[in-house]
Amino acid sequence: MTGASGTLERPSLRRRYAARRAERRRSFDRPRFLRVLMAGFLLWTFAPIAIVVLFSFNAGKSLQNLDGFSTRWYSDFFGDEQLRQSLFASLEIALVTMVVATVLGSLLAYGLVRARNRLSPVTNVMMLIPLVVPEIVAGVTALLLFTQLGIQLSVTTIILAHITFSISYVTVIVRGRLVALNREVEEAAMDLGATRLQTLRLVVLPGLWPAILAAGLLTFALSFDDFVLSFFTTGESPQPLPVRIYSSIRFGVTPTINAIGSLMLLVSLSTIALALALPRLLGRRGHTVLIGRDAM
């Protein structure tokens, strides 16, 4: 009897030991301090932004005490001629950069995916160089290039520098979408008599529109609030808004700076939200259209 009971106790002990090990693994995979760490990270990241937005509506000039709610600093911003010119210059730079970089980056992505040759691996690596090179290096390089060519620094030089830096972002996004498209659909369209241009316009572009729009909006957001490239390639006037803020903040921080930062944050967040929402909406509509055609 003793031997039998000992034999029964051993499997139960093993099961208990295995259950304890499983519990330890689950507790290790889901550490209790993870939520606290995440909350601390979010607080450290977004608390300064929230303070800037809050004090942009402060009625007084104090940057430490709230004296009431007011929009006077936004009125001062739009009433300042130089700040308005800087805002319009930033919008112009971002819009032109978005259009040109999106077109060139999309064409480059199509060429890298569809035109396979011996130089494709080298071209793919060269296309990624602007993404890994520090932005200050790109800014100094652009400044030296324009200086050596005798080109006067202005809004045009800023746009050229932003386009050069943004093409790689567009290429990466569009190329990822293009690789996911079925090549057989293009071949079927050409077998049915479509030319390469018609295949690109009627088959490839409808599938690429979500990625192209997302890449364009992301490029707009990056160009609108870029400081490093703008600082090295800007002229005397009009200066982009980030450079104007830097020039003003050297003489002291005013509540108007908080209002400018809040407006730039609003523009950037709105652009990023559109970049995330539009591809999903267009993807759903495209999926619905395909189902209707298949049903017919």
Image (spheres, grey):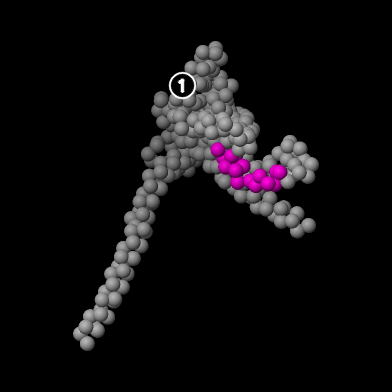
The image quarter containing residue 211 is top right
Residue closest to the eye, 28 or 87:
28
Q: Is residue 227 left or right of residue 278?
A: left
| Residue with the mark numbered 1 | 140
Q: Which residues are magenta?
A: 172-187
Residue closest to the eye, 206 or 195:
195
Residue closest to the eye, 40 or 135:
135
- Residue located at (41% from left, 25% from top): 250
Asked whether 200 falls inside the magenta stretch, the response is: no
Q: Is residue 44 visible?
A: yes
Q: How many marks?
A: 1
- In the rendered view, would you say 182 is above or below 132? below
- Residue located at (38% from left, 51% from top): 39
Q: Counting other residues with Cα less than 10 Å from the Cα at mark 1, is it few (<14), some (14-19), or many (20 or more)?
A: some
Residue type pointed to by label 1: Val
- In the rendered view, would you say 157 is above or below 52? above
Residue closest to the eye, 89 or 206:
206
Q: Is residue 105 visible?
A: no
The quarter of the rendered structure image containing the N terminus is bottom left
- Residue located at (60% from left, 33% from top): 117
- In the rendered view, would you say 40 is above or below 11? above
